[in-house]
Image (cartoon, grey):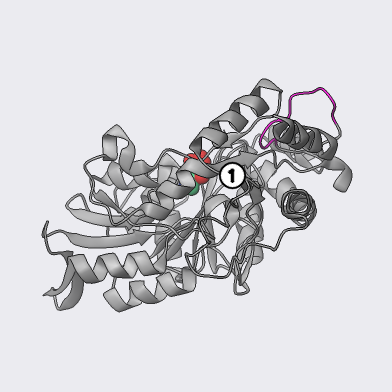
């Protein structure tokens, strides 16, 4: 337990609090949040129309480099709309990773489509292009329907209607290789970038590699609007369509009430967008603080060690990942990436050690959390098709998230 105590002492020192409870990720409101919220109330623009809605969309589009950014009520319904808009139907299958937050799989299930789970890489914890390609090569065939070549699952006969990788805890996955595979098999790519605002792969912001990318601004995210999400796209027409269907597909007109599509009431209120604008004004400081925290974890855990070679695709040496001598490791940003370090990850040597550490840290007022139970193990998705998931299973036994909130004195 001495080893665990040292870790807790280190985290307490990092957050400069000897006694208080330390959460995993708490929001920080140190900018214009209050002022902008007051402005909403004074002007009465609290609902889904208002200048902060437009401003927030512009700011995120500019920051991420996406041509269009469309705000939504949360990330889950942004994913739902993204999947609908790229042509996912109830009778199709969607490839995704088993190591993700439930919303990714739920959004697929809302449409009635079936998720199929393929493995992740050990270094990025996101979808492995190798595993994806292997599954597609072994399990699918090309068929021509409506003069278009499509990919079908040979055993179920169902069309593969989308591929949804996720950038786990803000670390970008090998998204360029995944995008190439999507092109090759003519399958739309939807990036679940809910956790990766501020993360770049080969210089390009996550969420920009496929047809649509999705962000979340839930209270625990890098920046928050209380609850909120965003759709990113570089297709102007698709962007217009997305905006239209988030707002009940109402045809713009000064007084007429007419709708031309089954739309959704998924648009973010101005009140939430006001928070978003104030938070975006501080994003560089927020990310700088998060990087300092990540560097401190790397320094503490990986000090004096030969750094784990994070650049070997999918082959973080399984011994080396945590080491033979029970050394706990911090997972650093993958090669070719800038990570937002949303939630810092450490790797324990096995599930038993993981559980002992989770108990010790939570008993001592420092919030830590294991990674999500794999989607294919949950009751609702246990009958879904899967590839070989050995990397996801290995990570499930070992990953622990440690406190990663912005430190205000860093600002
Ligand atoms: C990977 C992932 N996808 C989707 C979501 C859904 O976002 P929201 O909570 O805004 O609905 C989240 C976060 O909450 C997430 O972590």
Q: Which residues are magenta?
A: 17-26
Residue 190 sits in quarter = bottom left
Q: Residue at x 53, y 61 (%)?
A: 316
Left or right placement of residue 263 versus residue 157 in this view: right
On screen, residue 292 above or below 184: above
Within 10 Å of disc 1 (Cα), the crowding (few <14, some 14-19, many 20+) is many
Furthest-front residue in view? 325
Residue 21 sits in quarter = top right
In the rendered image, which residue does mark 1 sit on? Answer: 217
Residue 134 sits in quarter = bottom left
Disc 1 beta carbon < 8 A from ligand 1?
Answer: yes
Secondary element type, mark 1: loop
Left or right placement of residue 301 versus residue 267 in this view: right
Q: Is residue 356 visible?
A: yes
> Which quarter shows the N terminus?
top right
Left or right placement of residue 272 versus residue 289 in this view: left
Left or right placement of residue 158 versus residue 117 in this view: left
Front residue of 14/72: it is: 14
Front residue of 106/401: it is: 401
Front residue of 223/307: it is: 307
Residue 279 is situated, as x and y percent measured from the top left of the image, at: 72, 47
């Amino acid at each position: 337990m001495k080893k665990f105590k040292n870790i807790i002492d280190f985290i307490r020192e990092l957050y400069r609090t000897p006694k208080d409870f330390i959460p995993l990720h708490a929001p920080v409101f140190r900018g214009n949040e209050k002022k902008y919220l007051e402005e909403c109330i004074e002007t009465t623009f609290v609902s889904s129309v208002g200048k902060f809605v437009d401003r927030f969309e512009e700011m995120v589009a500019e920051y991420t480099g996406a041509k269009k950014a469309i705000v939504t009520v949360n990330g889950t319904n942004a994913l739902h709309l993204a999947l609908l808009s790229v042509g996912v139907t109830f009778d199709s299958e969607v490839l995704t990773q088993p190591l993700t937050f439930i919303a990714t799989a739920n959004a697929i299930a809302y449409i009635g489509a079936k998720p199929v789970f393929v493995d992740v890489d050990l270094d990025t914890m996101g979808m492995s292009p190798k595993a994806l390609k292997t599954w597609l090569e072994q399990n699918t065939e090309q068929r021509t329907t409506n003069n278009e070549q499509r990919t079908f699952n040979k055993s179920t006969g169902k069309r593969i209607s989308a591929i949804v990788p996720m950038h786990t805890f803000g670390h970008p996955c090998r998204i360029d290789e995944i995008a190439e595979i999507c092109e090759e098999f003519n399958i739309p790519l939807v990036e679940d970038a809910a956790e990766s605002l501020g993360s770049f792969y080969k210089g390009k912001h996550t969420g920009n590699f496929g047809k649509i990318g999705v962000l979340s601004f839930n209270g625990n995210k890098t920046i928050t609007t209380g609850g909120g999400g965003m759709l990113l796209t570089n297709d102007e027409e698709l962007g217009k369509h997305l905006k239209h269907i988030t707002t009940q597909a109402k045809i713009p007109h000064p007084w007429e009430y007419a709708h031309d599509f089954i739309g959704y009431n998924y648009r973010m209120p101005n009140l939430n967008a006001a928070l978003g604008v104030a938070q975006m004004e501080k994003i560089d400081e927020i990310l700088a603080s998060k990087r300092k925290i990540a560097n401190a974890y790397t320094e503490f855990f990986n000090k004096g060690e030969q750094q784990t070679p994070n650049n070997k695709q999918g082959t973080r040496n399984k011994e080396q990942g945590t080491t033979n001598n029970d050394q706990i490791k911090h997972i650093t940003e993958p090669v070719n990436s800038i990570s937002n370090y949303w939630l810092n990850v450490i790797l324990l040597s096995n599930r038993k050690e993981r559980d002992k550490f989770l108990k010790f840290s939570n008993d001592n007022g420092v919030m830590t959390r294991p990674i999500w139970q794999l989607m294919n193990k949950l009751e609702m998705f246990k009958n879904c098709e899967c590839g070989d998931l050995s990397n996801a299973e290995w990570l499930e036994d070992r990953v622990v998230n440690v406190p990663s909130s912005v430190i205000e004195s860093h600002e």
